[in-house]
Amino acid sequence: MARRIGSRYTAHQVLGRGSAGTVWLGDGPDGPVAIKLLREDLSEDRDLVGRFVQERQALLSLDHPRVVGVRDLVVDGDDLALVMELVRGTDLRTRLEHERRLLPQAAVAIAADVAEALAAAHAAGVVHRDVKPENVLLDSSAPTGPGGAPPALLTDFGVAKLIDAPSRAPQAAAGARIPSQRRVIGTPDYLAPEIVEGLPARKAVDIYALATLLYELLAGFTPFGGGHTGAVLRRHVTETVAPLPGIPDELWQLLLQCLAKAPASRLRAAEMAAGLRALVPELEDLPRLDIDEPAADEPEPVPAGAVDAYASGAEQAPPTDGGRPLRGAVPLVRASAPDSNRDTHTSMRVPDSDELAGGARGTARVPKVPGQPRPGSARARQRTPVRTRRLRLGIVAVAIAAAAGIGGWVAASGDNGGAPPGGNSEQSSPEEP
Ligand SMILES: Nc1ncnc2c1ncn2[C@@H]1O[C@H](COP(=O)(O)OP(=O)(O)OP(=O)(O)O)[C@@H](O)[C@H]1O
């Protein structure tokens, strides 16, 4: 059923759904477009609409072959929509689900494309903040490149910032007895350690997320994913990345540098792009990596009360895998569970200090059960319906208690309505790393 969006666009058919809204195939004055119609609760938020309009120029001016161009922003009655260039193809998550791991040459070529997109955005002072396979579109209408990889385009610029606002602080705060709190916007597996520590999201967070994505394309799992969200966040700050046997040392060194805990140690986007691009020819004969998921720590039993605790006050317990909460599946907002009937971003419960500290519920890396994929791995994802997973892994608003007993991880933001320290600006000054 066709639907008018503003005075210039018609939406014809749903292409996909994400945490912030629904993407439609549509028509505009200049031909076919993709229209991302934001969720109703977002479009009703006056502050958000204001930011949407403010962002207009930055988003419209990002013009690069590796960036999904935003053509228009529509604010019309209850409709709030981003009109984008239409990419004919799939997203990178879908491809990863089919292949589990990519050929190293294809993985590196795709990551180089994304790094080029980031270099252009960063030069314009725009930080993406939510780089992940779901936000990389593969253009199947163009000729394939090295390793059979279609050209990759980065999408969803600006959406994380739209959702990240004091007025959108998680409703959980009231019930969670948090003295002061801040929020983290992003997807847990790809969150840079400085975000977990409460620092503002600067350009280097995109480099970290892209290196995480590249690691995942090569390995089939992210370096710090698996298990409870609190444990994932902790690993970003405290753990070293497990090596990937079978890749050239130069590639490994580049990955390590981009996954550095200190943002200043990471490469800049243009350097990363050049480094990756130079490595592509060398990877021609390299087969898919044949590695298993990291050796698990000793299984930590999930206490009987743990899942009940999630459900207390909630309509339903979070999805689990053999009794263990799935990655990104645990609501952080008490009494809030992903609602499969709405295109909402996942609401998540506030992790308590025990979880953040990696206690019994925090878990170390979730152990691999023989014959079963580790939760969070590409194989586990294959068993999870895409729609459900998207809702789970969408942009999350994580409220972290400032007093969360993890040795100064979280800087209290005082009574600032939950805004991250340093404000929630996605635009960073041009001189920033
Ligand atoms: N410009 C586009 N052209 C063609 N298809 C698109 C375009 N943008 C998005 N899509 C399709 O719509 C789907 C949903 O996109 P959307 O950005 O809303 O969600 P997401 O990135 O998967 O999740 P989230 O927003 O939660 O991070 C994508 O998986 C993709 O298949």
Image: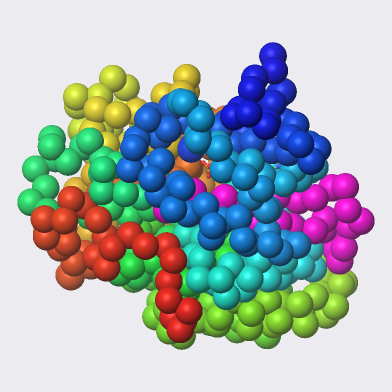
User: Of all residues shown, which one is farthest toward the top?
Assistant: 1
**Residue 201 showing in the rendered view:** yes
Q: Please give the name of the residue rendered at 36% of the width and 50% of the height, measured from the top-left corner.
A: 164
Residue 146 included in the magenta stretch of the image = yes
Quarter of the N terminus within the rendering: top right
Could you tell me if residue 256 is visible in this image?
no
Residue at the spot 48% in from the left edge and 42% down from the top edge: 393
Residue 206, position as x, y percentages in the image: 51, 67
Query: What are the residue bounds of the magenta stretch?
Result: 137-162
Left or right: residue 101 compared with residue 266: right
Where's ligand 1: which quadrant? top right
Residue 221 sits in which quadrant?
bottom right
Question: 241 left or right of 12?
Answer: left
Residue situated in front as seen by the camera: 260 or 136: 136
* Residue 333 x %, y %: 27, 37
Q: Is residue 127 left or right of residue 201?
A: right
- Relative to the observer, which residue lies in front, 130 or 403? 130
76 versus 370 height, above or below: above
Residue 24: % across, % down: 66, 30
Q: 54 left or right of 115? A: left
Q: Nearer the viewer, residue 325 or 81?
A: 81
Label total for image: 0
Task: Say if 429 sits above or below 249 in the image.
Answer: above
Say above or below: 406 vs 72: below
